[in-house]
Image (cartoon, rainbow, N blue to C red):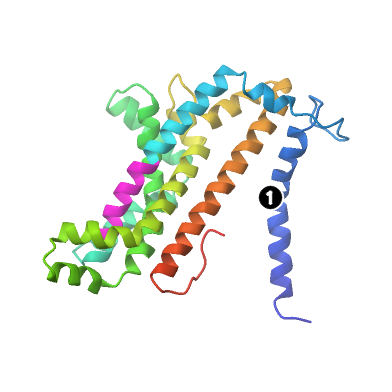
């Protein structure tokens, strides 16, 4: 008997328990009946067709795409700066500062959401809007961006930048012409991961969204109506497909960056 079979069996059972419910989404999304139950009544695409005629859904999707895009750009930009500073030099309080930045990774989202809601409404007396959601999503996405970009910057040979500066380039010029192209796969990977996190987030958006809900908040609102459950299944199928596609693309760019640096891949998202 091969060693490690128990761990493999546990991994298979765990993954089946975790992802098997997702397989039910397309089953009921393409089911003709409005009731979510077995046996299936027949194949139909009418729930997907109904998505195209629901204006409230289009508005929620537009809000989510805008928020996710702006969040991904902001979080990745700040992540590049933090990861660059973390790998460039040592300074007093460096470990503490980076640890503080990474804190949202271990804090429950509802704690972050309530804290930010108090700050926005009670401290600054601001109205809830897409801007408040973008700010909150940026806070939770920065640690993921740094985690991805740290590896990209740490894998670089410092002699590349030193050689560029010896040839007359400024530090900014060396960073722009030498460093950025080398870490570009990591930047693309960070953009995609941050986009997915923002697009799929519900807890923070539920607390901080204004009159215009995001896609997850809109889906949650549909759960109050039994007749809308097939629509949720169809919409969930689309969102899962998009998320998996973006995750695969992000992993491709991550592996490309590792290969470009000439290092051995030690694992990633997939």
At horizontal 44% and vertical 26% (from top left) the residue drawn is 209
Q: Residue furthest front?
A: 167
The x, y position of residue 142, in whole percent, is 36, 48
Image quarter for residue 152? bottom left
Question: Residue 162 versus residue 23: which sits nearer the camera?
Answer: 162
Give the vertical position of 134 relative to 253 (above or below). Answer: above
Is 56 placed left or right of 158 in the picture? right
- For the N terminus, the image quarter is bottom right
Q: Eyeballing the image, is 213 above or below 258?
A: above
- Residue at 69%, 70% in the rendered image: 7
* In this rendering, position of residue 35 left or right of residue 14: right
Looking at the image, which residue is at 68% across and 57% down? 15
| Residue 46 in which image quadrant | top right
**Helix or strand or loop: what does disc 1 sit on?**
helix
Q: Is residue 81 magenta?
A: yes
Q: Which residue is mark 1?
A: 19
Residue 117 seen in this snapshot: no
Q: Residues within 10 Å of mark 1 (few under 14, many from 20)?
A: few
Tell whether position 255 is magenta.
Answer: no
The part of the chain drawn in magenta is 72-84
Left or right for 176, reference 140: left
Assign the magenta stretch its main secondary structure.
helix
Q: Is residue 83 above or below residue 157?
A: above
| Percent coordinates x, y for residue 236 in the rendering | 64, 36
Residue 168, percent from left and from top = 11, 66
Q: From the image, which quarter does the C terminus lie in? A: bottom right
């Amino acid at each position: 008997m091969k060693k490690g079979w128990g761990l493999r069996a546990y991994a298979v059972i765990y993954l089946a328990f975790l992802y098997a419910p997702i397989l039910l989404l397309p089953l009921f999304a393409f089911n003709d009946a409005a009731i979510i139950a077995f046996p299936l009544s027949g194949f139909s695409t009418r729930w997907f067709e109904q998505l195209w005629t629901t204006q409230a859904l289009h508005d929620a999707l537009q809000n989510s795409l805008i928020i996710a895009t702006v969040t991904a750009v902001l979080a990745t930009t700040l992540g590049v700066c933090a990861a660059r500073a973390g790998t460039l030099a040592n300074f007093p309080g460096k470990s503490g500062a980076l640890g503080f930045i990474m804190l949202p990774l271990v804090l429950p989202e509802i704690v972050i959401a309530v804290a930010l809601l108090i700050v926005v409404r009670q401290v600054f007396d601001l109205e809830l809007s897409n801007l408040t959601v973008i700010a909150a999503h940026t806070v939770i996405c920065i640690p993921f961006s740094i985690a991805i970009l740290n590896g990209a910057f740490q894998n670089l040979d410092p002699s590349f930048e030193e050689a560029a500066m010896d040839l007359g380039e400024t530090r900014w010029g060396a960073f722009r012409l030498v460093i950025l192209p080398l870490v570009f796969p990591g930047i693309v990977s960070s953009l995609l991961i941050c986009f997915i996190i923002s697009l799929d987030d519900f807890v923070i958006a539920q607390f901080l969204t204004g009159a215009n809900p995001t896609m997850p908040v809109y889906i949650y609102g549909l759960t109050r109506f039994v007749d809308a459950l097939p629509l949720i299944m169809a919409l969930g199928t689309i969102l899962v497909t998009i998320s998996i596609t973006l995750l695969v693309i992000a992993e491709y760019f991550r592996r490309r960056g590792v290969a470009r640096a000439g290092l051995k891949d030690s694992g990633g998202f997939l």
